[in-house]
């Protein structure tokens, strides 16, 4: 059944592994197997014999092989856990053989060997599985010439040298068409590269490297262990869940760790997680690389370490960490050691609080506990594996022991076993069925092959998947045929549906395990969450935070390069540093951030402003000149008093209209002037309160027309007085040109010009309400915008022009008699008017908001009060306090 190429490969590999020397002629003249007979295995014959490879022994590599001589046997550690995996395979096969609904006409066998977690040993074991066990040894003479020719060194070897040669023709154990193994990703890759050309399928129960999913490179691979692509997603979600953005990542220089770390770094970056360091240490873990690793750990601020290692490497690292007295580390275990209880006895103080994802656990495999507990001295003597378990667990030596391994203590120095010992009396990872994870994977792997064989058996001729509809035959199957059925097999086991994707990977499901110290000091692996890759990303990870026991205190450690930036601040990257290392910068004025670790601040809307924490936009204060504030009250009072004063003077003048003081000062124009002064004061009230568009359009044209009327009246009064005293010739008609009608017409004309300017202003670009948000950062100033600046300054300019004419006319009348010299008072009023409005211009330009409005009102009131008091105060004084002077005689005296 095995191809001749496999036998040639067997001979070549075994030649490298053994120091026997044979002639080159003997290698090619007949089939021979060179080396020692391998008897340490579990074997049971059947119609189809399933091969199995398990790391029953492991050791820390102290040196790399040179391949020039046979490696010296070292001190191996014994894994009772791996022996349980072996026994789970035998249990599953025997369980299937007893079933009537699965392979009733076919009996399965098994051939299980130890890989020692070592590539050369694994290759040798795999070739023994797929080629079958050679027959009994024969003795053959080796000639001197043959040996010398083969050695190539001319060494003088005795012609009496005799070599044991195992016959390939006499196979005592059936070849296996499929291998269930190995636990290590690196070993599995080596096996696949060796067995792949012969199309022999490999089903791994614990190899998780995502690289094995590459079907173009490993087309004959399947596994019941989820790919690391799922594990690293779970780990990235986990560290992100606890806010650990600054983590250390370590691993053995191997394909498993290298690919896992590469995937983790990519996946974790999506959650804002950075690696404080990534360190791959060599296979030969001597003191120097250990010191380098510990220096990195101690020199980093990260308190969380993700460890992509197997159980044996973790032991070496923990011993070194204990020597350095490094504490307070939150260990995150990869699935390779997340449930390895054997580490607890020696390193429980360092590993308490460890978190890690363990593969899906079977609550119970019915009958497995009883199968494991049946071991007795009487039924284990023929197996060196079981003998080693007994002696290592109970620390005694069986009579006639076949155990040849040395574990720290020479097994020959142990006290003899009494025969009354019971494995159930002591704890052993072999009989511990509380964490059936890898064992469950082994169990599923056996059933995968069994269901594939059942599909092959059920195939009807002519309807098969192969050429011309042929079917494979279980009794004479080809390995590649079996693999075809395996790839397309779906089944249910212990209530779980088992399915595989196109890469031969199962759908991932992990339990989040927490290493808890019980009161008696024992370890309890507590499930505190789970990760299910079949769920949506936001639901895939569930963590019960309150159930977790932490390494230090009662809460998760902080492991960040930079503390989180609170709301109100943004992240500022440090040049040349990872993205997790940053500074926190307060948001600029007008900007907020309402999330932790915001990359940017957002600007508040125009009508809002940040609070003091700059994490919330609040409505801006609305500001305008109000009647309720002191400034508004003062200006409002001034406007009311001015209006009242103007009306009171108007009433007084009307009452005394026949007196010389009033009549001599052009009574009609005085009435008009007083009336429009009252209007000016009232217009001041329009500027107080919240403005609106219609109010803004009234304010300025009314701030312009009213003052044009007032100054026009003053101008007319001045011109009349001036012309009256300049017209010296009797019968002159000059005064006819300045009669009452002409006076009214001149006032109306001057006012109409201002009105026309205001109409053009309102029709082109009128004033409007403006919400000024740029003057005060946290205040909206509601103000009247002038609209057309040209219109605004034309209105002011025209008023200034009238004032200048009035002032000029008053200056010309300065030499008139005092009793008739009203021009003197007009001059004073115009001087006040000029002073007010010249001062108004720079103040107006330099203020904003309600202060601009206040400047407007102040200018209106000041100029109006100036006109009122300068022109009418002297006359009111005479009318009220000096009535005896209010006579024609007194007026004509001077």
Image: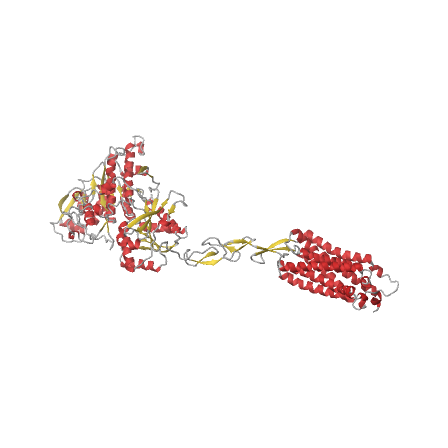
- Tell whether 34 sits left or right of 295: left
Rendered location of residue 746, percent (x, y): 79, 58
The picture quadrant where one finds residue 871 is bottom right
> Can the viewer see residue 641?
yes
Note whether 108 is above or below 803 in the view shown: above
Rendered location of residue 361, percent (x, y): 31, 44
Q: Residue at x 40, y 44 (%)?
A: 539
Which of 842/689 is in front? Answer: 689
The quadrant of the image that shows the N terminus is top left
Note whether 560 is above or below 3 in the view shown: below
- Tell whether 661 sits left or right of 177: right
Rendered location of residue 689, percent (x, y): 64, 55
Most extreme residue toward the left, as rendered?
A: 160
Which of 613/812 is in front? Answer: 613
Q: How is the image coloured?
A: secondary structure
The quadrant of the image that shows the C terminus is bottom right
């Amino acid at each position: 059944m095995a191809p001749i190429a496999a036998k040639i490969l067997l001979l070549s590999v075994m030649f490298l592994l053994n120091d026997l020397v044979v002639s080159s002629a003997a290698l090619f003249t007949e089939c021979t197997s060179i080396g020692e007979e391998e008897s340490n295995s579990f074997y049971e014959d059947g119609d189809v014999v399933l091969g199995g490879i398990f790391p029953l022994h492991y050791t820390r590599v102290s040196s790399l092989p040179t391949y020039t001589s046979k490696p010296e046997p070292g001190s191996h550690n014994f894994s009772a856990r791996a022996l349980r995996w072996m026994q789970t395979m035998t249990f599953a096969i025997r369980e299937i053989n007893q079933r009537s609904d699965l392979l009733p006409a076919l009996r399965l066998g098994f051939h299980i060997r130890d890989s020692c977690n070592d590539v050369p040993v694994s290759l040798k074991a795999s070739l023994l599985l797929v080629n079958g066990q050679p027959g009994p040894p024969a003795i053959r003479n080796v000639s001197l010439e043959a040996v010398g020719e083969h050695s190539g060194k001319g060494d003088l070897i005795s012609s009496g040298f005799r070599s044991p040669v195992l016959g390939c023709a006499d196979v005592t154990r059936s070849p296996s068409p499929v291998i269930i193994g190995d636990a290590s990703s690196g070993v599995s890759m080596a096996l696949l590269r060796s067995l792949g050309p012969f199309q022999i399928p490999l089903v791994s129960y614990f190899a998780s490297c995502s690289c094995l999913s590459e079907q173009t490179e490993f087309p004959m691979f399947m596994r019941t262990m989820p790919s690391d692509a799922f594990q690293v997603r779970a780990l990235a979600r986990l560290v992100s869940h606890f806010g650990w953005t600054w983590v250390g990542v370590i691993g053995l220089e191997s394909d498993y760790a290298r690919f896992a770390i590469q995937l983790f770094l990519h996946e974790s970056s999506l959650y804002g997680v950075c690696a404080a360091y990534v360190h791959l240490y060599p296979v030969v873990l001597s003191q120097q690389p250990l010191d380098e690793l510990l220096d990195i750990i101690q020199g980093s601020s990260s308190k969380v370490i993700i460890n992509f290692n197997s159980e044996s490497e973790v032991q070496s690292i923990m011993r070194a960490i204990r020597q350095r007295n490094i504490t307070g580390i939150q260990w995150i275990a990869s699935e390779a050691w997340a449930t390895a209880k054997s580490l607890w006895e020696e390193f429980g103080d360092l590993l308490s609080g460890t978190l890690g994802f363990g593969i899906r656990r079977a609550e119970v495999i019915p009958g497995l506990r009883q199968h494991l507990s049946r071991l007795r001295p009487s039924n284990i003597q023929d197996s060196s594996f079981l003998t080693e378990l007994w002696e290592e667990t109970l620390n005694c030596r069986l009579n006639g022991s076949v155990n040849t391994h040395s574990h720290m203590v020479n097994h020959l120095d142990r006290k003899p076993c009494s025969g009354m010992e019971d494995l159930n009396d002591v704890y052993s990872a072999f009989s511990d069925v509380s964490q059936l994870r890898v064992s469950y994977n082994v169990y599923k792997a056996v059933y995968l092959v069994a269901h594939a064989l059942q599909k092959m058996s059920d195939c009807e001729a002519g309807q098969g998947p192969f050429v011309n509809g042929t079917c494979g035959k279980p009794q004479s199957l080809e390995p590649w045929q079996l693999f075809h059925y395996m790839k397309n097999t779906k089944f249910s086991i212990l209530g779980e549906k088992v399915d595989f994707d196109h890469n031969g990977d199962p759908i991932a499901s992990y339990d989040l395990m927490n290493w808890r110290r019980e009161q008696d000091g024992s370890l309890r692996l507590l499930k505190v969450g789970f990760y299910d890759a079949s769920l949506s990303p936001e639901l895939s990870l569930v963590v019960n935070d309150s159930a977790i026991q932490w390494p230090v205190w009662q809460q998760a450690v902080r492991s960040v390069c930079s503390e989180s930036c609170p709301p109100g601040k943004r992240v500022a990257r440090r040049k040349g540093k990872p993205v997790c290392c940053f500074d926190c910068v307060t948001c600029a004025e007008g900007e907020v951030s309402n999330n932790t670790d915001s990359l940017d601040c957002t600007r508040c809307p125009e009508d809002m402003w940040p609070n003091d924490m700059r994490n919330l936009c609040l409505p801006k204060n609305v500001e305008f000149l109000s009647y309720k504030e002191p400034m508004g009250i003062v200006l409002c009072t001034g406007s009311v008093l001015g209006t009242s004063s103007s009306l009171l003077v108007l009433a007084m003048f009307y009452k005394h209209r026949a007196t010389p003081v009033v009549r001599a000062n052009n009574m009609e124009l005085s009435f008009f002037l007083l009336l429009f002064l009252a209007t000016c004061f009232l217009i001041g009230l329009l500027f107080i309160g919240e403005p609106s568009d219609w109010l803004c359009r009234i304010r300025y044209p009314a701030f312009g027309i009213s003052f044009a009327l007032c100054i026009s009246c003053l101008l007319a009064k001045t011109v009349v007085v001036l012309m009256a005293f300049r017209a010296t010739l009797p019968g002159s008609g000059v005064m006819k040109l300045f009669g009452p009608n002409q006076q009214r017409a001149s006032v109306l004309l001057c006012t109409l010009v201002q009105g026309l300017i205001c109409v053009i202003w309102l029709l082109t670009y009128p004033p409007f309400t403006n919400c000024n948000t740029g003057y005060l950062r946290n205040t909206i100033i509601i103000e009247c915008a002038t609209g057309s600046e040209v219109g605004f300054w034309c209105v002011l300019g025209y008023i200034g022009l009238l004032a200048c004419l009035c002032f000029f006319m008053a200056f010309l009348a300065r030499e008139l008699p005092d009793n008739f010299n009203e021009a003197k008072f007009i001059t004073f009023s115009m001087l006040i008017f000029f002073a007010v409005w010249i001062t108004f211009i720079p103040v107006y330009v330099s203020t904003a908001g309600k202060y601009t409005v206040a400047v407007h009102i102040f200018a209106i009131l000041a100029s109006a009060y100036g006109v009122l008091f300068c022109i009418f105060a002297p006359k009111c004084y005479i009318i009220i306090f000096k009535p005896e002077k209010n006579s024609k005689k007194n007026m004509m005296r001077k």
